[in-house]
Amino acid sequence: MISEGASIRWGTRAGRSREFEEVALVHLDALYRSALRLTQNRAEAEDVVQETCLRAFRSFHRFNPGTNCRAWLFTILRNAFLNRVRGAGREVHEGDAAEGWDALVQRSAEHRPGGGSPEEEFFQTVLHGDVDRALKALPLTFREAVVLADLEGLSYKEIAEIIGRPVGTVMSRLSRGRRLLRRALGDFAREHGYVGEPE
């Protein structure tokens, strides 16, 4: 949270820069992970994150201290990505987010830092591609909700801010997306003998 004295420091360029570093740049890794999932290209991901940071810094005077900086940055990232998609001549459909936003859920090539339990390691090494395929098969509006909630760890409210929809819509999409994903992964598990047929 920004201290009371922060608003005084914003009066100087150096103060604004320090405050931006303290408040916004702590989210840089999450922004890069998402950009990489979106673009599927390291150089493009770096460009999208750079554009996001530049836009955020230029608009930082409009950021309300005490509000959710992470959601604000993800919104800027999403818009920067959508503008790149439009600039490349690809059509963007409202409600679908964008054709390329689909890459956010289709690829999770970058694992979260810092290892995990044996179950998590198994998931990452053995089932990762199958989960990606199951995610890709979801309708885009459901994929977007599942990825932002379950892969990025964002709250309903944050997701609603990012995609510009009510919290109830986010909850509905997430519930339906998870149900479809469970069904698809259940089918996969039965096909590969991990679980038996339902009785």
Image: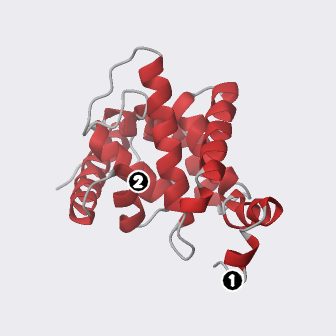
Q: Check the image and report above or below for 51 versus 156.
A: above
Residue behind mark 1: 3
- Residue 162: which disc? 2
Q: Position of residue 45 (x, y in %)?
A: 63, 33
- Figure quadrant of the C terminus: bottom left
Of the residues tagged 1 and 2, which is closer to the observer?
A: 1
Q: Nearer the viewer, residue 106 or 190?
A: 106
For residue 110, which quarter of the picture? top right
Q: Position of residue 30 (x, y in %)?
A: 62, 52
In the current view of this chain or complex, which residue is farthest to the top?
89
Instruction: Tell me the distance, in whole angstroms, between the alpha carbons under discs 1 and 2.
Output: 25 Å
**Horizontal arrangement in the rendering, residue 31 relative to residue 192 (left or right):** right
The correct choice, above or below, for 52 with respect to 7 in the image is above
In the orientation shown, which residue stands out farthest toward the left?
Answer: 199
Residue 105 visible in the current orientation: yes
From the viewer's perspective, is residue 177 above or below residue 22?
A: above
Q: Quadrant of residue 165?
A: bottom left
Q: What colour scheme has been applied to the protein in the rendered image?
A: secondary structure
Q: What percent of the width, then of the height, locates residue 20?
A: 71, 61
Amino acid bearing label 2: Ile
- Residue visible at 32% across and 52% down? 164
> In which quadrant of the rendered view does residue 3 lie?
bottom right
| Residue 111 appears anywhere in the view | no
Q: Is residue 51 left or right of residue 189?
A: right
**Residue at 63%, 79% in the rendered image:** 1
Nearer to us in this view, 156 or 87: 87
| Amino acid, disc 1 | Ser
Question: Does residue 175 sit above or below 1 in this rendering?
Answer: above
Q: How many marks?
A: 2
For residue 84, the mark is none
Mark 1 crowdedness (10 Å alpha carbons): few <14, some 14-19, many ≥20: few
